[in-house]
Image: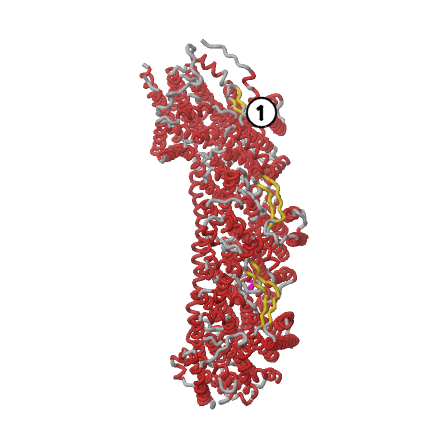
């Protein structure tokens, strides 16, 4: 017969839920406001969203570290908090990009902002747990919202992008659950701390390796899809191209760092247990990803599409750190994405600022290289700023991403994978070519005659965002020390 | 009995799903999919997951299939669809290899053996009760998140299928870009 | 007595059928059918493991998968309706503008 | 002024940023003023430098990323001091000679940024800060070559950037490995060179690290077979770009050998004398031949740079104070001489818009001052005694002779082949009758050009006759360096090859 | 004394710099006068120093440190001892004469000021060369004279290149470059010698080095000796680095007189004399030096036999006489070499200056076949050249007799009869070609009239300026004993053996006989008119000699051309096609891989899904591989 269950509220530790509650509440609030009064300006929603995210940020900061809650489903450990903070900062910086001088379809919906906040809630749930079910639900919540947000841009490109992303996402979800099924079958649990224990205990059993590795493999397909590792990356360039620039920029950061955290929980578990096959799968995927995507990026004609390949390459770069299984490597992931965030934010915002509604320069692309030809003459400040972002992406010191690269490569070297470090270094050199290409167009080529003002979409908020990005990108070295020690602390207290 | 039922169901399910993926006729495909879903719920019942079986029936056969049916009608795709299918060889090579891979993984005896359950099915309690017990304690948060997810899906569905998507503000020139207003490019 | 493996192999085969459908279909609607098959295959696996190990977690997972599947259908159909209205086709061969 | 090094770095930086606000018509005066002040500051640095101290002076230390051991750590010794002075000088003279170019403002600002990077490279004692400036120097140079260059400027600029960038990334991996080893040994992270010096690395580790650093430096130098970016870069770059490139940027590579490879990997450096020496000899002979085959004046000078850099490399790997001091001195002299030669080629290019030797002939009659200064630089380039070129070349070769007489004899072909291509250049351009009508009316050097070239000629003679003020501090520091290497060396081979000067031994 | 040393050394430099100030202006007589006066000052100071050394002793001064690095410490130190004093006096004397002479010779040249600047700079370099107290200081001067020689050979740089048939030297600038590069080749040898000394002795100071000679191994001394001699071979144009000297005649004639006869080319001899403790220690090397010298003596003389070019004949004779000096020095008779060096400086400079007069008169025509009978219009020049030729031929009592005869004695005394014989034979040849020149130019028929020349004698003061040389060419030999007394203060005294002493009268007679024989033959052949034989001129030996044994052509074919071609290959085939193409190839491969791989991004969703399934399978295969490999 059933026993009555008594649950103490204190034990539930509801505080661990507070960040997500804030953001879900905020989303509902937006929906409610929309119900009460139509035709409110998007700026209201933008600011509301920023406020909500700000409160969320506060709530996340105030969380105790390594707290579990709600029957141990919620897990607010260091990496979870770090990831959430990154997500929130990124979101706070990306959402004001809605305040353009031109109207774009998605921002005419108040629901856009609600969905945006729901998506953030999904991401937060995803990282704040080590339960595969929770991860899956969070992932799907966020993804479904994301697909919609992309489609809402309402251009042929965005429709195609959404379809492609959605379909592949569905397939990836299939792989994820199959992988989870294997893990569950082997351990009787879907909670990773349990899973790890059982795995440890059963490692030596004969015939255990096949399902062990097989499960990891299936999960890796799903993870690889989300962080866009070759050959599961194919949606990425198309989606970046089809989606609006802010969305593309957002996708290059937030879903990836989220999935990285999941990968840290899932794949790193295998690596930590010494399953060499998984380690090698990660390394090979990482190497293939950074190399091939670099090569493909070289031949692109559109800046946004090039940036898509570049973010694939960066993902591969960071993915390599996952195979190393050292605190430093895990820290480097966060550091890298934290710095990548600002650079990419800046770069995509610049693209967004230069967005015209019509494709004036190319029958297909909004941002072909030619568009930026001779920018130094028509808009020197813009050219310099864009160049700073490109140089940062290249990894030229003292710009922010250099420090990220430095730390990742350093972690690789420390772990004894010198060949991998060299591959990473060479890849950075290849990558320099296509970033340089844009700089070459901007600085070294003459402007296209008869070109009109390129900053068609500029507005004050966008300028502010660019300003913030530039400031962080340029002066990152001065925040490195606190940032690094914070990240190191957070990662190491999480037991990684 | 159980053995017989399993094999019957298995073969039927596999066959129906094969029809789903191979048939050129949308209607056949959907019908066989629905039938397969029903049979899967049968499997659930065999496995003693009564609650799951019911949910499967309701959600899949009821909701999902109904949605698809509506969609199908909307798409005017009741008949045979023309597809330029991928060469069969590639499909079956990939399908076959994935099947081999999956079977190898799943056929491992280690799965399900020597496993200590974390949520032991309580004795003497029927399945829905037991499920409810776990769902509303341990899995309350995921449950609520699933609710959010459904809300998201709903909003998404409404927006995407809504009339407002017919004209794209992203393409209509506003203000200074007045020429070529709202032309669809495709 | 049917062993757990039987169910799991069934699940594996169904999943493979799903994969075949996904990679073969060009009509997006029918492609979505195949993704449903994939999710269902996982459901069978979870239910079977759950049943054989006497653990309820699997059934939970399966339950959530069903919820996810339903949501996906909603969003997916929304997308399909959108593109059908705009372009009058569901054949994915027609959506190859973004490439390279 | 204790923090003069920071001033040297940040003064041009601030000036460059403020330069954005200066109106284009006044930018030349602004640029000259800033560069002049910077040069005066470097002179002040030299004056307040204690020549009797072989260690680092004017040290500044400020933690940047303390948990990762990255510090803002600056200092100069005799080895770097003069390169800094030369950098400021060449920048100043480069700006002085700048002709009427498009977008002068952008050029001046780029040059000031470049100066920041160049000074930074030579005064930083932290590997990461060094790397920072090292990489950053590529950016303004890319712009200068790519915007103001010739026909194929884009190709040249990109090639320059990518090639050096790739090499230095490998070097970065090496640096990170050293830091890792340091961390393993001491438990602390540090990228400070002085900390790294103290690290005695196992031979096998030294060996691969040596090549990692080598790649970064060799591409910069550039050493055969990594040199092909240089002719393009020089061929396409505007005069000022070539001047800076040849005078300073190439020196970063050889400076790197002296600053990193030798003290950090003494055993590996000794072990790889042979391959490095062979490469250097190939550079000397082969590139001299290629230089002889050139039709374009500037390309001759460009290839001659590679050839001379070969001698510098030989001197660096001499492992004795004579050779290393010689190579450091040769860096300076080559900087001044090749810089001046590029300026001179630029002068004629400004007038005729061609650099092909076949277009000239008989210039000595038309432009006697020009011919005179060119002649002085030519003689310095071929290493005539009592010019600046001789001291370094002689010491480098003399030093390497201790290591390998045969290789020195081969390397000594520099003396012959250098004369061959330089004299044939001079003959083709300056001697013979004036064949082209348009050459008959060429104006001789104007005031601005003289203002840049005469001081260089004066330095060429002054330091050729009386090198002591420069060679002295270099020698002191180099002696300390060699002494240090000797103490640190582990293998008997290294102990044998590294030759500490007698005076150091006696002092001990 | 220090003041005298510096006065002697720096007066020419001051003159050079002074003239340089006017370098780009039109002719200013002032420069010529000032430089000449300063040279005179230098000469007086040198003579005073000579007196000082003779009566007090050597002077040593140190100006300052030059190169100090590691253990290497090279000062600007100057040492005036017996050898240096002789050299200084000879150099400054000839220089002064040449400077004054040039005032007239270069009267109408546009580069008048420039010329004096270069010429004085040369004297300064030469003085550094002879006065330095260490090998590297010597090397400064060594290279300095090289550059000045380059500048002066190429003084008329505006002349275009012509074919070798038209002018064997091609052009002044070509000849200048040839001279410089040839010297550089030798300088590398010298540098290696210096390195050897430094690393084995630890110093480059003469005194330290020579003090260390007894402690050095024989092999090492041989090496040092050989490498230093290679350096000397370049400067003194010994075979096989001799071709530049004849081509150097493209320079103005005063230059040929000063640099390419009297002073610079003897620097090699000076080096051997200076390094005599070293060469004395390795007689094998000395013998080698002597053999090379002997060979060059006859080799050059043979080429002079048939040449028609006034200056080239004299140049070959210079070469030949340098051979004599090396023979003497190599055989250990250092003072004899020095004696011949000085004597030769006087009469050869005189000869060249005379030739300059002729050229001046003949409007730069050099072909002696186009002259003849000039003694009527150029009496004084004729006398000077006659005296110089007699001295050169070694006729008693002229200076050449004493010095050359002593060399032959030495060769005989050393029992190197082969050397003696060759040198003896050369003496005859020398007499012949010298007087062939004299007879063809000053006697015989007045062929110049056919070519429309109007020769005339040069200015009076120029002739007066030549007088000291003419005087010394006659009387210098008479002071042999004093000279020996003086220089043996430093150099080893060379005493002939008893046996040789007895043979002396015979030797002298034999030598005089062949010299006179040579003159007589020349007289017979040429005193009346120019006799040319087509047959002889077409014969192989004649053509070989006329074309300098085809060596310049050989050098061009074997070294210059292949080097140019090889350079072209190195650039076009290797640098561009291999090295650079590899780099570009890598870039291209990367880019093409990009083009190839981007095809997977086909845009078709179905393909994407296939890739995803395929990716999963690939991962599985990878896992299998990893597991299989443990």
Position in image of residue E227 (x %, y %): 47, 67
- Which quadrant would the N terminus of chain E be assigned to in this image? bottom right
How many labels, in total?
A: 1
Q: Is residue D379 magenta?
A: yes
Query: Would you say E405 lies left or right of B170 here?
Result: left
* Callout 1: SS: loop
Q: Is residue A82 magenta?
A: no
Q: Chain of mark 1?
A: A
The reply to whether residue E591 is visible in this rendering is no
Q: Residues within 10 Å of mark 1 (few under 14, many from 20)?
A: some
> What kind of colouring is applied to the model shown?
secondary structure
Viewer-nearest residue: D65 or D111: D65
Viewer-nearest residue: A271 or E326: E326
Magenta stretch, main secondary structure, is helix
Position in image of residue E599 (x %, y %): 42, 40
The reply to whether residue A460 is visible in this rendering is yes
- Which quadrant would the C terminus of chain E be assigned to in this image? top left
Viewer-nearest residue: C49 or A213: A213
**In the image as oriented, which residue stretches furthest toward the top?**
A1
Viewer-nearest residue: C87 or E203: E203
* Image: B159 above or below D327: above
Position in image of residue C89 (x %, y %): 45, 30
Range of residues picked out in magenta:
D376-380
Position in image of residue E444 (x %, y %): 49, 89
Residue topped by disc 1: A63
């Amino acid at each position: 017969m059933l026993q009555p269950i008594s649950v103490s509220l204190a034990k539930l530790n509801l505080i661990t839920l507070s960040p997500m509650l804030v953001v879900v509440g905020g989303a509902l609030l937006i929906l409610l406001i929309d119900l009460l009064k139509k035709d409110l300006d998007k700026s209201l929603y933008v600011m509301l969203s920023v406020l909500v995210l700000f409160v969320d940020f506060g709530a996340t900061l105030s969380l105790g570290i390594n707290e579990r809650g709600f029957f141990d489903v919620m897990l607010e450990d260091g990496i979870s908090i770090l990831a959430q903070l990154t997500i929130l900062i990124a979101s706070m910086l990306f959402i004001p990009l809605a305040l353009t001088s031109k109207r774009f379809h998605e921002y005419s919906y108040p629901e856009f902002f609600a969905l945006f906040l729901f998506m953030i809630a999904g991401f937060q749930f995803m990282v704040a747990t080590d339960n595969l079910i929770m991860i899956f639900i969070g992932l799907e919540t966020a993804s479904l919202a994301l697909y919609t947000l992309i489609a809402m841009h309402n251009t042929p490109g965005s429709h195609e992008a959404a379809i492609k992303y959605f379909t592949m996402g569905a397939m990836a979800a299939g792989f994820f659950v199959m992988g989870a099924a294997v893990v569950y079958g082997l351990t009787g649990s879907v909670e990773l701390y349990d899973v790890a224990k059982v795995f440890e205990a059963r490692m030596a059993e004969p015939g255990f390796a096949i399902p062990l590795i097989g499960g990891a493999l299936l999960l890796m397909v799903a993870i690889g899809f989300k962080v866009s590792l070759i050959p599961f990356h194919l949606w990425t360039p198309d989606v970046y191209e089809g989606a609006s620039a802010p969305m593309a920029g957002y996708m290059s950061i937030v879903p990836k760092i989220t999935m990285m955290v999941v990968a840290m929980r899932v794949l790193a578990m295998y690596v930590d247990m010494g399953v060499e096959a998984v380690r090698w799968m990660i390394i090979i995927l990482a190497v293939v990803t950074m190399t091939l995507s670099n090569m493909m990026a070289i031949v692109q004609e559109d800046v946004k599409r090039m940036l898509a390949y570049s973010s694939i390459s960066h993902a591969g770069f960071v993915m390599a750190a996952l195979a190393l299984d050292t605190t430093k490597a895990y820290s480097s992931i966060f550091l890298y994405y934290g710095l990548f965030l600002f650079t990419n934010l800046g770069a995509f915002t610049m693209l967004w600022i230069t967005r015209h509604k019509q494709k004036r320069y190319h029958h297909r692309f909004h941002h072909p290289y030619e568009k930026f030809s001779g920018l130094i003459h028509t808009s020197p400040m813009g050219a310099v700023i864009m160049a700073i972002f490109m140089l940062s992406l290249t990894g030229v010191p003292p710009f922010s991403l250099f420090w990220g690269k430095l730390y990742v490569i350093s972690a690789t070297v420390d772990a004894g994978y010198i060949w991998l470090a060299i591959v990473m270094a060479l890849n950075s050199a290849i990558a320099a070519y296509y970033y340089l290409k844009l700089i070459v167009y901007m600085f070294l080529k003459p402007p296209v005659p008869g070109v009109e003002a390129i900053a068609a979409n500029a507005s004050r908020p966008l300028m502010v965002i660019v300003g913030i990005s530039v400031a962080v990108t340029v002066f990152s070295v001065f925040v490195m020390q606190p940032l690094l020690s914070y990240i190191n602390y957070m990662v190491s207290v999480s037991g990684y | 009995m159980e053995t017989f039922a399993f094999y019957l169901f298995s073969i039927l399910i596999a066959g129906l799903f094969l029809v789903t993926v191979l048939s050129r006729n949308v209607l056949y495909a959907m019908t066989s999919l629905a039938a397969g879903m029903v049979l899967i719920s049968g499997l659930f019942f065999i496995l003693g997951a009564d609650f799951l079986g019911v949910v499967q029936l309701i959600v899949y056969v009821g909701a999902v299939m109904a949605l698809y049916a509506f969609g199908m009608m909307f798409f005017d795709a009741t008949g045979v669809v023309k597809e330029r299918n991928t060469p069969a060889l590639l499909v079956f090579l990939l399908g076959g290899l994935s099947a081999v891979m999956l079977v190898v993984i799943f056929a491992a005896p280690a799965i399900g053996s020597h496993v200590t359950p974390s949520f032991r099915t309580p004795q003497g309690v029927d399945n829905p009760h037991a499920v409810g017990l776990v769902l509303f304690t341990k899995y309350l948060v995921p449950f609520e998140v699933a609710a959010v997810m459904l809300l998201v899906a709903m909003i998404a569905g409404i927006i995407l299928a809504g009339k407002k998507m017919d004209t794209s503000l992203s393409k209509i020139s506003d203000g200074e870009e007045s020429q070529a207003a709202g032309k669809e490019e495709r | 007595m049917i062993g757990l493996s039987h169910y799991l192999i069934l699940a594996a085969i169904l999943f493979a059928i799903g994969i075949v459908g996904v990679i073969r279909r060009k009509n997006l609607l029918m492609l979505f059918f195949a993704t449903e098959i994939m999710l269902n295959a996982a459901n069978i696996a979870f239910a079977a493991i759950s049943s054989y190990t006497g653990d309820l977690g699997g059934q939970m997972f399966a339950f959530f998968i069903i919820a996810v599947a339903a949501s996906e259908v909603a969003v997916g159909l929304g997308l399909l309706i959108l593109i059908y209205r705009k372009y009058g086709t569901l054949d994915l061969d027609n959506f190859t503008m973004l490439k390279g | 002024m204790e923090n003069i090094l920071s001033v040297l770095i940040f003064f041009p930086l601030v000036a460059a940023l403020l330069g954005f606000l200066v109106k284009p018509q006044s930018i030349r005066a602004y640029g000259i003023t800033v560069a002049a002040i910077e040069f005066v500051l470097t002179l002040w640095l030299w004056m307040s430098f204690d020549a009797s101290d072989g260690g680092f002076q004017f040290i500044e230390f400020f933690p940047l990323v303390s948990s990762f051991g990255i510090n803002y750590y600056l200092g100069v010794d005799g080895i770097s001091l003069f390169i800094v002075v030369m950098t400021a000088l060449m920048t100043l003279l480069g700006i002085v000679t700048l002709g009427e170019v498009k977008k002068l403002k952008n050029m001046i600002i780029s040059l000031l940024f470049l100066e920041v990077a160049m000074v930074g490279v030579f005064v930083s004692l932290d590997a990461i800060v060094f790397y920072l400036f090292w990489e950053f120097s590529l950016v303004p140079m890319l712009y200068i070559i790519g915007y103001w260059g010739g026909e194929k400027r884009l190709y040249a600029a990109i090639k320059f950037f990518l090639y050096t960038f790739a090499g230095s990334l490998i070097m970065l991996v090496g640096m990170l490995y050293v830091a890792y080893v340091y961390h393993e040994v001491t438990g602390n992270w540090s990228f400070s060179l002085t900390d790294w010096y103290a690290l005695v690395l196992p031979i096998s580790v030294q060996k691969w690290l040596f090549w990692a650093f080598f790649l970064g430096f060799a591409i910069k130098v550039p050493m055969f077979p990594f040199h092909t970016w240089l002719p393009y870069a020089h061929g396409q770059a505007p005069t000022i770009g070539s001047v800076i490139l040849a005078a300073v940027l190439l020196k970063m590579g050889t400076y790197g050998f002296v600053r990193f490879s030798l003290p950090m990997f003494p055993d590996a450096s000794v072990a790889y004398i042979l391959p490095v020496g062979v490469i250097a000899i190939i550079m000397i002979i082969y590139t001299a031949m290629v230089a002889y085959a050139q039709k374009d004046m500037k390309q001759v000078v460009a290839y001659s740079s590679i050839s001379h850099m070969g001698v510098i490399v030989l001197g660096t790997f001499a492992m004795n104070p004579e050779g290393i001091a010689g190579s450091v001195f040769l860096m300076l002299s080559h900087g001044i001489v090749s810089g001046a030669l590029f300026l001179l080629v630029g002068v004629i290019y400004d007038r005729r818009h061609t650099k092909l030797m076949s277009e000239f002939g008989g210039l000595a009659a038309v432009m006697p001052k020009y011919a005179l200064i060119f002649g002085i630089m030519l003689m310095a380039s071929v290493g005539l005694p009592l010019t600046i070129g001789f001291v370094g070349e002689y010491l480098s070769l003399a030093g390497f002779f201790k290591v390998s007489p045969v290789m020195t004899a081969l390397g000594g072909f520099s003396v012959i082949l250098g004369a061959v291509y330089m004299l044939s250049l001079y003959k083709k351009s300056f001697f013979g009758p004036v064949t082209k009508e348009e050459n008959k009316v060429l104006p001789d050097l104007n005031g601005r050009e003289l203002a840049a070239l005469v001081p260089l000629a004066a330095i060429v003679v002054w330091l050729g006759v009386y090198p002591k003020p420069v060679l002295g501090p270099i020698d002191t520091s180099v002696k300390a360096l060699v002494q240090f290497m000797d103490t640190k060396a582990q293998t008997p081979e290294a102990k044998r090859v590294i030759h500490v000067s007698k005076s150091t031994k006696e002092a001990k | 004394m220090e003041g005298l040393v510096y006065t002697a050394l720096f007066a020419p430099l001051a003159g050079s710099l002074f003239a340089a100030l006017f370098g780009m202006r039109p002719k200013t007589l002032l420069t010529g006068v000032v430089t000449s006066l300063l040279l005179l000052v230098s000469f007086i100071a040198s003579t005073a120093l000579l007196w000082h050394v003779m009566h007090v002793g050597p002077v040593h001064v140190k100006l300052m440190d030059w190169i100090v690095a590691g253990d290497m410490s090279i000062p600007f130190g100057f040492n005036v001892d017996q050898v240096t004093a002789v050299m200084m006096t000879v150099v400054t004397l000839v220089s002064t004469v040449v400077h004054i002479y040039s005032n007239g010779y270069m009267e109408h040249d546009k580069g008048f000021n420039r010329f004096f600047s270069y010429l004085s700079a040369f004297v300064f370099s030469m003085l550094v060369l002879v006065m330095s107290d260490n090998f590297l200081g010597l090397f400064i001067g060594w290279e300095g004279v090289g550059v000045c020689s380059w500048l002066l050979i190429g003084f008329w740089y505006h002349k275009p290149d012509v074919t070798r048939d038209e002018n064997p030297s091609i052009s002044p600038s070509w000849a200048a470059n040839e001279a410089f590069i040839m010297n550089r080749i030798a300088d590398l040898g010298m540098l290696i010698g210096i390195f050897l000394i430094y690393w084995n002795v630890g110093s480059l100071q003469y005194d330290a080095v020579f003090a260390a000679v007894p402690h050095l191994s024989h092999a090492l001394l041989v090496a040092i000796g050989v490498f230093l001699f290679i350096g000397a071979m370049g400067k003194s144009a010994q075979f096989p680095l001799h071709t530049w000297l004849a081509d150097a005649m493209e320079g103005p004639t005063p230059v040929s007189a000063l640099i390419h006869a009297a002073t610079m080319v003897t620097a090699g001899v000076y080096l051997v004399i200076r390094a005599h403790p070293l060469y004395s220690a390795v007689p094998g090397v000395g013998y080698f030096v002597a053999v090379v010298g002997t060979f060059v003596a006859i080799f050059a003389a043979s080429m002079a036999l048939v040449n028609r070019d006034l200056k080239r004949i004299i140049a070959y004779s210079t070469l030949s006489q340098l051979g004599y000096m090396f023979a003497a020095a190599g055989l250990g008779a250092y003072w004899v070499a020095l004696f011949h060096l000085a004597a030769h400086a006087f009469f050869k400079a005189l000869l060249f200056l005379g030739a300059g007069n002729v050229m001046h008169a003949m409007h730069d025509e050099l072909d002696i076949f186009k002259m003849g009978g000039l003694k009527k219009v150029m009496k004084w020049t004729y006398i000077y050249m006659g005296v110089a030729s007699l001295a050169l031929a070694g006729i008693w009592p002229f200076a050449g007799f004493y010095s050359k005869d002593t060399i032959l004695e030495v060769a005989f005394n050393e029992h190197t009869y082969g050397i003696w014989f060759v040198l003896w034979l050369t003496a005859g040849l020398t007499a012949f070609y010298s007087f062939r020149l004299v007879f063809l130019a000053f006697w015989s028929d007045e062929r110049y009239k056919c070519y429309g020349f109007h020769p005339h004698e040069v200015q009076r003061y120029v002739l007066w300026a030549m007088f000291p040389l003419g005087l010394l060419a006659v009387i210098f030999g008479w002071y042999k004993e004093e000279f020996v007394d003086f220089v043996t203060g430093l150099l080893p005294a060379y005493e002939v053996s008893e046996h040789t002493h007895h043979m002396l009268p015979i030797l002298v007679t034999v030598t005089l006989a062949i010299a006179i024989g040579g003159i007589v033959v020349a007289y017979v052949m040429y005193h009346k008119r120019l006799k040319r034989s087509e047959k002889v001129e077409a014969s192989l030996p004649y053509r070989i000699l006329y074309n300098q044994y085809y060596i310049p052509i050989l050098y061009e074919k074997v070294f210059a051309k292949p080097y140019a071609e090889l350079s072209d290959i190195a650039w076009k085939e290797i640098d561009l096609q291999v090295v650079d193409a590899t780099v570009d190839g890598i870039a291209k491969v990367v880019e093409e891989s990009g083009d190839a791989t981007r095809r997977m991004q086909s845009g078709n969703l179905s393909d994407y899904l296939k890739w995803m399934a395929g990716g999963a399978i690939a991962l599985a295969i990878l896992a299998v591989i990893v597991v299989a490999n443990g």
